[in-house]
Every structure is written in C-alpha cells, then in structure tokens.
Amino acid sequence: MCKSASPLAAVFSTALVSVALAGCSGSNQVGDGDDYIAAITPNNCVLDAEIEFSEQNNIGENEQITNQTLFNEYKGLTLAYANAADEAVAALAAKSWPENIKNDVADAMADYTITGALARAGVISDGQNEDDGADWDTINGFKNFYLENSKAPDTRKIRAELGLPEVGGYDCEGVELTADLVTPSGTGDGASFESGQAGLTAIGALDEEQFFDDLINSKVTYEELSDEDWSKLIANVSLFSDQELALARELESKEWPAPVKSHILDYIAYLYVSSAFSRAQVLTDTVPGDRADFRELDSFSSEWVLKGQRVNFDAIRSGLGLEVQKFN
C-alpha cells in the first residue's frame, strides 16, 4: 500500500503524458531492472490506493457509486491511475529493451495504454453521476471482456530477464498520485463541434488510397501488405490516434449545454479508448513482418465499437442546432 499519499492527496493536473509513436522503439540506452521498476511503480502505487479506497468504502466491481462526494473522490483516483498508466508507457518507450523481452515490454505498454484509457472513459462518461450507471457498467463490462480475452503481458518473463523477483519490488514512499482532471475553460457550441469533426474527416480522407480500400473490402490481409504499404498504414493509424486524442482533450476542455452534455461525455470516452487501441496497435508492432499483435488488437477495437460506449451523434447535432446526419 502507498505509505505517503492517501487517496485524497492526489494532485490535480491537466497535463496528459504524450507518447511519440514514431519513437516507440526507445533510445539507444538499454533498459534494466531499475528502469523497469521505476516505470511501473507509480501505476502500481495508485492501483494499491484505489483498491484500498474501494475496500474502505465497500465499492464493488462494476457497482454504481450513488454518493456524489464518494464518486468524485473515486474519480480522482481513477484518473490518477489512467495518468500513471500513460506515464508508465512513456517511461518504457524511452528505453530500448533486450531482444528476448522486447515484444513482452511492448505488450505491457499496450496493456497500460488500453486499461488506462478504459479507466478514464468509465469515470468521464458517467462523470455527472446523473443516470443509473449504464455507462459505467457498459465500459467496465468491456474492460472485463478485454482482460478475459486479450493476451496478457508476460511480466514474469520480463522480470526474470531483468533479474527481478516475480512480483513486487516497488516502494510507494514519496510517490505522488497525479489525477489528470480537466476543468472546462470555455463553452462548446455547434461551430467548435463541427471543427473537431473536420479534423477527423481530413485524416479519414486518406482511406481513398487503394491499399486502404483493399483492406476495408478484405481483398488483402495485414500479412499480405508490402512493407511500404504497411508503413503507410502504421503512419495513418498513428495520425488518426493523435487526432482522436487531441479532439477528446478539446471537447473535454469546454462546458457543453445540458441537452448534449451526457452525449458529449460519451463521445469523449469513446475517443480516448479508440485512440488507445490505435496507439497500442503501433506500440506492439515491433518486429518487421510479424503483424499478429496488430491484427489481434484490431479485432478488440472492432469489439469496442460493437460492445462499448455508443454515441448518439444525432442528439448532439440536434442539441447544438446542427443539421442531423449520420456520423462518418
């Protein structure tokens, strides 16, 4: 358990850690056991604090918190967990790792990326605590689906290679829990919403290239793509992920009218998770010619569209005085 920071001692910040996907292969400095422990410690510490807080307040898994004060405290911890997950990815990406665990570290980075985004999405989409907890249950239900069906990172293999014990080894003394909480500083309207959509549409226009059409129509598989086209695909995924993340932050920085607020929160949650899956796909594609991880995460991303947070774009557009149209 954390020794120096209670759950309520979280420091609120608006800075989201940004991981440069183009540099995800790390630096020339090879990471060691100390680097690994330093990277994962904040995440483990905030998870300890969250578990302790849940036990103290009888918060069950997937259970809606009806007390607003309790929910706000839990939200701060959950956002601190998401922020620590981002920081862990950035720290791991800043190093190169021994070849026999390189893919395993990439898997761990992808897992942090996705679970952190799902945690953030859960408390954002249910951020006003005004409904019956349906959003909360939906996102946590998908999180359980992902954890049950995904390939878990082989952290024991990583630790063995780095000369670490199978578990533990981290010290929470002096670790500061940082909640990435955004306070809206402006008012959102139809024009600002349309502007955000224009950015996504511009990125999506790249799909006109033939190899994207072939992929969409299942004429070729990821394995059949040439190295050149594969590089184009990775670049497109990275660009779209960056744009989705930027749009989520932009939408979150504004106060939205009551009729559309809950739907905008759903959209922000969706963008965080969608962006995370794309980032994870690129992070795990560390071996040329081995595209299995990319394909696996692509299938989970598709499941997120089917099982995850649904966004009522018609309600958003209507509430903002815009022409109702199907989102593309």
Image (tube, rainbow, N blue to C red):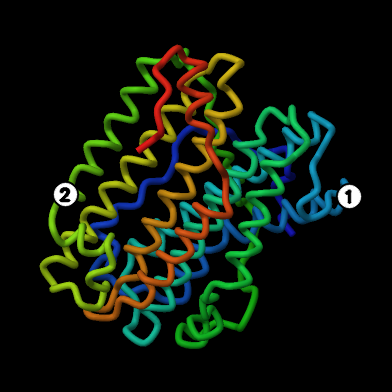
Query: Where residue 315 appears, x then y in whole percent?
Result: 53, 24
Q: Which residue in the protein does label 1 denote?
A: 58
Which amino acid lies under the numbered mark 1 shown in the image of this protein?
Asn
Query: Where residue 161 appears, x then y in whole percent?
Result: 45, 87
Q: Residue at (61%, 15%) from the top-left corner?
A: 258
Query: Tag 1 or tag 2, which sits nearer the N-term?
Result: 1
Q: Residue at (44%, 72%) from the top-left corner?
A: 107
- In the image shown, does 46 or 272 lie closer to the viewer? 272
- In the image shown, does 95 or 281 lie closer to the viewer? 281
Q: Mark 2 and mark 1: span between their CA atoms?
A: 52 Å
Q: Residue at (34%, 28%) from the top-left corner?
A: 196
- Tag in front: 2 or 1: 2
Q: Which mark is residue 261?
A: none
Q: Residues within 10 Å of mark 1 (few under 14, many from 20)?
A: few
Give the position of the C terminus as an image quadrant. top left
Q: Which mark is residue 208?
A: 2
Give the position of the N terminus as an image quadrant. bottom right
In this view, 237 is above or below 152: above
SS at circle 1: loop
Q: Residues within 10 Å of mark 2 (few under 14, many from 20)?
A: few
Query: Where residue 46 appears, x then y in whole percent?
Result: 65, 53
